[in-house]
Every structure is written in structure tokens, then in C-alpha cells.
Image: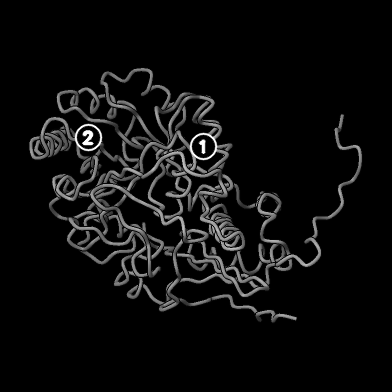
């Protein structure tokens, strides 16, 4: 039985409304420019020797660590193969909004050749409608990964437009502040450097996985012990496992790290192993919390994680999971289960979400500076004015509308350019 008692009329802009004039999707003009520019929207697009790719001294356990050819550097198997996508939405009043994700040229193709038809000519404030038609129209080939990342970049650009049209920061459009300032932990290879910079905790990558055998596990625990000794007994420490482990290996790791006061162990299994996450959580022999969700998408994916009790906290990436529109649904859903949200990365795009909802207690900041021990913009050279943490706190300027940053178009390339529409 249908509850639709009548066919709904088309969604059209109100009379005299500001509408979307042009949608443009960009990549970085070259791999060299992306690496030299700090990665832009792809934090893994870094030069050889950067800690985030893995180094000779400290590799990073990952899903490809089972294969000797690919285990030493995450770049060898293409963690950075797609690169950045940057969406710029131009309105008929001349304002522009900017959103980002990863996905490179494939995402640009989807945005320019598919999604643009739903956007241009529409009211940018009809964000729920625009998200829904992009989602429904791409269901046959999308639902996760690249397609949802393309939707995320568009959605963030729409929220940026909305803030500028209302002359308010995005967090005010979401309901205003729930915290006066935002505490940050650092993701890095040297937690002692993070502590010296004032961060409230630090997360470091697990070097070795199951393919490295008992010797790899011994080295993992040695690394954990050395870091704990360096930062002292009480500084919060977290371990990022980047989808690299198995149920048995994770349970053994949790047992062995018990003496080292680990706050949480993150993304220990591949993201689709929901039953495995449930089992680890039920059998967790330690006091460490269990987290996942960085590589999950949309409310439906996160509902599975919540219904199956996969984790103690969830970590959607706002630039990947469906943008602000979907992230706020995920946040609301998690609050009903009393599960907190700590978004992965995302910088300004997650900061505004975190300001606006009480069940997002802290922010992640990845130390992407080449030295791995200083603060540089998460999005590299992409923006002029990205807010940075000071002494472990992020403060957003209430006088900057939208997401409060200014796009630098240097090094941008539009691979699937269409003829721009002009104002009538």
C-alpha cells in the first residue's frame, strides 16, 4: 500500500531565487604538483619518503601487506592512484562554493557528465533533494566508493554555497555550537612530537600484520612499548591498523597491548567483515576501545555497523561518506545507539560538523608536514586560509561564511570541461 496520495510536482527554484549556474570538477594538473603541494585533497599523495606511505624503518600494515612486492610502501599498490577531486559550484549571483574528495578524473567524469544535469538551474539550498536525486540516479553503479565520494564533494560545495548565501558558517546552519572549541589528537609516526605540539593524544600506524608472523607481532609490541615510554604513562595513544588484520591477530594484539594503556585500536579488519568486527568486540580482552568506519559509506553502511555492534566509536570521513548531508544522518543515527563519532581527517569539513553536534567529542589532525613533526594544512596548498590547531585546539571564525576557506586555483585542471553557462 502506498502512502503517496498524489504525484508530487517537480522541484523548481522559487521566483527570484539564486540558482546554480555552473558545476566544475577539477583535478591537480600533475602528480608532481600534487605531491609538492602537500597532497591537496588526497592526503596519501605525497613524495617518496613521507611517513604516511611507509618507510624502511617503519612500514605501515595494510591490506596489501600479504604481498612482498607491495608491503614496503603503500604507494606501490596505488593508494594515491586516483588523487584529488575539487568541485566548484558557481551561482547566478557570482558566489562560489567548494567541496573536495578523492576520485580524480573518474570522479570528474561522473560529476560533469552525470550529476551536473540535476544541479545546474536548481536552487542550491534544496540540498536534501539534490542529494537524493544524485543517490537514486547512480544506484545502479554507485552506492559506495568513488560515486559516493563524487556526491560528497558536490554536497560539501552546496553547503559552502548555503553558508555564503546566508552569510553564516556551516556549523550555524547545522544548529550552532555545542562546544566552544574543538580538541584535537594527531595522527603521526612520532607521538612524542604530537605531545610537544600540544595535541591531546596521538595515533600511530601499526607497522606489521599477519604476513609478518610472530616476529612482526614482536616488533609491533616493541614499537608500542617504545612510544609509551617516550610519551609517559597517561598521554592518550591510539593504533591505526588500516584494514590489515584478521580476527585472531587482532585479539592477540589486544591481549599484548594491555600493559600500555591504549585508548583505541582502529580499523583492524577489512570494512566488509561486519561479523568479524562483532566477534572482536565481543571477545576484546583489553580495555582498549574498538573503532572503524573510515572506509564505510552512507547511513545504510553505518546502520550495519551499529546494528551488529561492530565498534565502540565510528569514524566516517565527511569528504567520502556522502558529505555533510549524509554525515549528519550518520551522527543522528549513532546518537540513538549512544555511540560517539570521531570523523576521519576532513579538516574544515568535519570541524563544522563537530562544532554542531554533541556526540563528536574530538577531531583528528594528520601531521602531513614533510618532517612529520610539525603542523601544516591538511589540504596542502589548496586553500589560502585553512584553520590550523593551536596547542591542540581548533577554533572556527564565526565571521567567515560557509566553510570559511578560499580556493587557490593554481595547479587545477578541468579534465571534462563543458561550455560554461553565462548569466542571463
Spatial separation of the CA atoms under disc 2 and disc 1? 24 Å
Judged left or right of residue 290, residue 321 is right
Q: Which residue is drawn at 45% across and 70% down?
A: 407
Q: What element carries label 2?
A: loop
On the image, the x and y values in percent for residue 281 come to 37, 22
Residue 236, label in figure: 2
Count up the numbered dots. Answer: 2
Between residue 360 and residue 101, name the one nearer to us: 360
Residue 320, label in figure: none
On the image, the x and y values in percent for residue 278 come to 43, 24
**Residue count near mark 1 (Cα–Cα under 10 Å), binned few <14, some 14–19, many ≥20:** many
**Residue count near mark 2 (Cα–Cα under 10 Å), binned few <14, some 14–19, many ≥20:** many
Q: Residue at x 51, y 68 (%)?
A: 105
Q: In which quarter of the image is residue 386?
A: bottom left
The residue that mark 1 highlights is 331
On the image, the x and y values in percent for residue 204 come to 23, 43
Between residue 18 and residue 69, name the one nearer to us: 18
Between residue 368 and residue 257, name the one nearer to us: 368
Instruction: In the displayed orientation, state which residue is furthest to the front.
Output: 399
Q: Residue at x 12, y 30 (%)?
A: 233
Quick one: quadrant of the C terminus? bottom right
Quick one: quadrant of the N terminus? top right
Amino acid at each position: 500500500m502506498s502512502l503517496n496520495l498524489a504525484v508530487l510536482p517537480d522541484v523548481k527554484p522559487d521566483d527570484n531565487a539564486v540558482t546554480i549556474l555552473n558545476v566544475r570538477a577539477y583535478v591537480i594538473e600533475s602528480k608532481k604538483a600534487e605531491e609538492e603541494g602537500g597532497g591537496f585533497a588526497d592526503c596519501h599523495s605525497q613524495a617518496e619518503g613521507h611517513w604516511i606511505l611507509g618507510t624502511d624503518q617503519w612500514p605501515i600494515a595494510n591490506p596489501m601487506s600479504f604481498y612482498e612486492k607491495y608491503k614496503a610502501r603503500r604507494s606501490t599498490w596505488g593508494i594515491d592512484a586516483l588523487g584529488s577531486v575539487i568541485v566548484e559550484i558557481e551561482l547566478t549571483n557570482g558566489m562560489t562554493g567548494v567541496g573536495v574528495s578523492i576520485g580524480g578524473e573518474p570522479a570528474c567524469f561522473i560529476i560533469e557528465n552525470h550529476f551536473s544535469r540535476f544541479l545546474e538551474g536548481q536552487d542550491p539550498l534544496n540540498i536534501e533533494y539534490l542529494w537524493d536525486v544524485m543517490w537514486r540516479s547512480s544506484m545502479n553503479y554507485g552506492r559506495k566508493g568513488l560515486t559516493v565520494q563524487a556526491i560528497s564533494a558536490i554536497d560539501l560545495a552546496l553547503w559552502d554555497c548555503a553558508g555564503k548565501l546566508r552569510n553564516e558558517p556551516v556549523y550555524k546552519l547545522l544548529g550552532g555550537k555545542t562546544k566552544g572549541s574543538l580538541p584535537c589528537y594527531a595522527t603521526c609516526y612520532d607521538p612524542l612530537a604530537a605531545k610537544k605540539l600540544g595535541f591531546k593524544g596521538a595515533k600511530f600506524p601499526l607497522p606489521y600484520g599477519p604476513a609478518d608472523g610472530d616476529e612482526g607481532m614482536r616488533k609491533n609490541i616493541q614499537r608500542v612499548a617504545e612510544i609509551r615510554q617516550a610519551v609517559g604513562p597517561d598521554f592518550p595513544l591510539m593504533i591505526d591498523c588500516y584494514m590489515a588484520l584478521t580476527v585472531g591477530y587482532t585479539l592477540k594484539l589486544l591481549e599484548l597491548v594491555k600493559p600500555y594503556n591504549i585508548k583505541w585500536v582502529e580499523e583492524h579488519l577489512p570494512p566488509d567483515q561486519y561479523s568479524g568486527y562483532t566477534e572482536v568486540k565481543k571477545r576484546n580482552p583489553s580495555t582498549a576501545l574498538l573503532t572503524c568506519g573510515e572506509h564505510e559509506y552512507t547511513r545504510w553502511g553505518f546502520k550495519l555497523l551499529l546494528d551488529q555492534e561492530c565498534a565502540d566509536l565510528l569514524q566516517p570521513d565527511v569528504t567520502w561518506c556522502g558529505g555533510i548531508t549524509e554525515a549528519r544522518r550518520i551522527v543522528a543515527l549513532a546518537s540513538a545507539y549512544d555511540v560517539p563519532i570521531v570523523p576521519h581527517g576532513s579538516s574544515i569539513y568535519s570541524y563544522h560538523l563537530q562544532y554542531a553536534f554533541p556526540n563528536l567529542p574530538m577531531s583528528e589532525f594528520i601531521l602531513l608536514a614533510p618532517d612529520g613533526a610539525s603542523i601544516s594544512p591538511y589540504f596542502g596548498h589548496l586553500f589560502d586560509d585553512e584553520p590550523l590547531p593551536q596547542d591542540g585546539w581548533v577554533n572556527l571564525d564565526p565571521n567567515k561564511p560557509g566553510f570559511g576557506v578560499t580556493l587557490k586555483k593554481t595547479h587545477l585542471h578541468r579534465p571534462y570541461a563543458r561550455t560554461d553557462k553565462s548569466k542571463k
